[in-house]
Amino acid sequence: MLGVSRQPIQQAMLLLKMDGLVVESGTRGLYVAPLDPVQIGHHYQIRLVFDQLAAQLVAEKAAGSKAFAEDLRRRGDKILSEGEEARNVGAAEAVSQDVRFHTFLYEMSGNPLIAPAADMHWNFLRRVMVAVLLHAERGPIVWSQHREILDLLAAGKASEGRDLVTGHILGAKDALFVALAQRESGATQSDQA
């Protein structure tokens, strides 16, 4: 049906399994993994550390170089504008732009190890973030916070930037957990009806 042999499909499924996007069900094969709050929490803990580190490094570089701060502002503003427009296109595009903003901060941090280390978590979190945007209605908040984060980092305010990044990520995690609980409560009520 797809016009490819079994081997590439098996390799793709193995990668999806390693990213936690599919799970085995005995001899019945692979299924889309349920959104498990415990696993989501673990991924958000790791993401928080990466983003805090990137924010710290970016702010320190901006504080030490006016040229860097101006480049950060110029490139960041472009990403923010495109991200704010993406909110109207759909959840998948909005998530892509959200990831783009955070990976931009990883890149600007100067630490080349942050982005590759975060990739595995982003593969999992993209799916989760779609659920946040679809069910928790955080789109406007997300981009407002991104703008505030960029403002603080470009001004070289490392401590304040880290604090806002922390609130941004924990707020997204909390909103997702509320949305999941509401979805679960709605599913339970419809099962009982």
Image: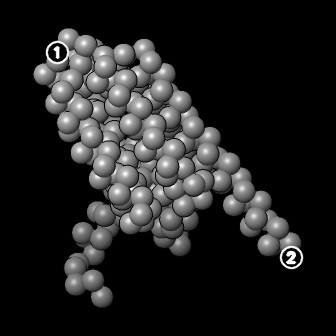
- Residue 159 seen in the figure: yes
The amino acid sitting under disc 2 is Ala
Name the one closer to the observer, 181 or 71: 71
Q: Is residue 85 above or below residue 75?
A: below
The location of residue 92, given as percent across then percent down, is 40, 62
Q: Residue at x 27, y 46 (%)?
A: 79
- Residue 23 is marked as none
Question: Residue 14, image x and y in percent?
Answer: 35, 59
Q: Quadrant of the C terminus?
A: bottom right
Q: Which mark is residue 193?
A: 2
Mark 2 vs mark 1, foreground winner is 1
> For the view shown, which residue lies furthest in the right direction?
193
Residue 192: quadrant of the picture? bottom right
Q: Which residue is mark 1?
A: 65
**Which residue shows up at 22% across the image and 17% down it?**
61
**Relative vertical location of residue 77 with respect to residue 124 in this rendering, above or below:** above
- The secondary element bearing badge 2 is classed as loop
Image quarter hosting the N terminus: bottom left
Q: Is residue 145 left or right of residue 179?
A: left
Relative to residue 74, is residue 22 drawn left or right? right
Q: Position of residue 65 (x, y in %)?
A: 16, 15
Please indicate, yes or no, whether residue 113 appears anywhere in the rendered image: no
Check the image and tell me how it is coloured.
one colour
Which residue sits at x=62%, y=41%?
Answer: 174
- Would you call the spot at circle 1 few (<14 residues within 10 Å), some (14-19), or many (20 or more)? some
